[in-house]
Image (cartoon, rainbow, N blue to C red):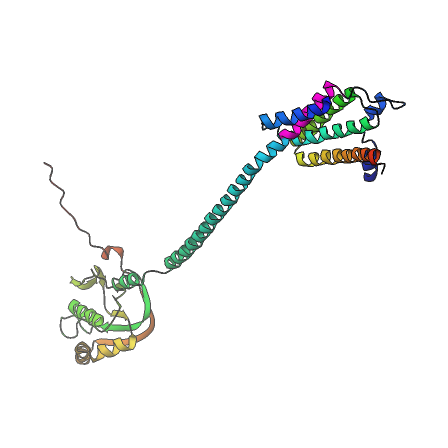
Amino acid sequence: MTAEGLLEQIAETALDDDYYVVRAGQPEPSRSFNTVLTASVLGVFALMVTIAAVQTATDRPTTEREQRALAQDVSVRRAISTDRRDTVTNLRAQVGDLSAAAGQENPDAVTLRTTTAGTAVRGPGVSIRIDPAADDGGVGDVSDSDLQVLVNALWFVGAEAVSVNGQRIGTLTSIRTAGEAITVNYVSISPPYTVRAIGDKQNLRDRLVDSQLGRDWAARAKDSGLEFEITTTTSQRLKAISDKRLKVVEARTAAKAP
Amino acid sequence: MIPVLGLVIGVTVGLLLQPTVPGALQPYLPIAVIAALDAVVGALRALGERRFNDRVFVVSFISNVLIAAFMVFLGDQLGVGSQLSTGVVVVLGIRIFANAAAIRRRIFRA
């Protein structure tokens, strides 16, 4: 059955078949239209129509109010979502800043760690080779105080990091004679001594050679035959000092028990 | 005219009492009204054709209303409530128009 057929059929059988079935044959005057039964059914019909109409009329303001409330809700939520989006953008920017900051160390801390020998450093500088000519305590010999003065002089002329025979000079480092040998960081070293310093290599070298100390060493080398040789290097690495020589450890007497 | 009196009484009662339909039944009222309207228009046409029968009218009225409400209920349960309501309204609307056209032809001969 086509759609048209369906619609036609509906239109053709619009009048309930019952009216034809029950009152088949010749039309007769309508029966019992003017009765209480018909009237009451019509009354029910009118009541239904009225109720539906009244209900729709009273519901309309409610519906409109609901709609307005919903629209308001939508705008409020939209504002909230905009707010949150802004917050997200802000936080994302903060996160970006923080992660960028986390990637690089505080320059002050880097400087401090370099100065205190807490970190290994690499860079240009000078390397001084000292080979004593004698061990008699004379001008040909090299004592602990010679090395102390030399290291201090290196600091003075601008070294950023200094090591003696691989022992990095830190804030707690001592250069001392112990028995036959010189100890640096309590590690015995033996000649020839190699003092390395990192800094502006040309400046370091020139200032050291020109200083009273440099001239003194040169004279001693000339007189006694000890070797004192300053060479510049473009890159050398000085390792960090051991942790033990970075920290000051204090012992405290325990409180006496009463 | 008792039937006209019934109509008037129905409208008056509805307006005066303004009874509220329970929320659960609200979706069915408009469809029931359309179905009832179909029965009433059919009755008017039958009246004009001298075939009116009060028993047929009462039965068709009640069954129309109940079936329409039931179809909407069923559609709601199946999740196609609005579609089924539309279908019921279309079919009843066509019937109402056809019956109204028959009445019109009888009265105006056009």
Left or right? Give the position of A35 relative to A114.
right
Vertical placement of residue B85 versus A100, above or below: above
Please report the residue visible at 49 percent of the width from the left and 43 percent of the height from the top. A73
Vertical placement of residue A175 versus A36, above or below: below
Vertical placement of residue B50 versus A130, above or below: above
Is B82 in the magenta?
no
**Outermost residue toward the front in this view:** B1
* Foreground residue among A155 and A97: A97
**Residue A204 drawn at (x, y percent):** 26, 75
Query: Which quadrant of the figure has residue B10?
Result: top right
Query: Which quadrant of the figure has residue B50?
Result: top right
Left or right? Give the position of A52 relative to A62.
right
Task: Tell me the magenta residue range.
Answer: A34-51
Left or right? Give the position of A208 relative to A11.
left
In the rendered image, the quadrant that contains the N terminus of chain A is: top right
Can residue B21 be seen here? The reply is no
Can residue B2 be seen here? The reply is yes
* Foreground residue among B45 and A81: B45
Please report the residue visible at 17 percent of the width from the left and 63 percent of the height from the top. A176
**Residue B5 drawn at (x, y percent):** 69, 23
Q: How many marks?
A: 0
**Residue B102 drawn at (x, y percent):** 82, 34
Query: Which quadrant of the figure has residue A92?
Result: bottom left
**Residue A66 drawn at (x, y percent):** 53, 39
* Foreground residue among A251 and B110: B110
Left or right? Give the position of A25 relative to B2.
right
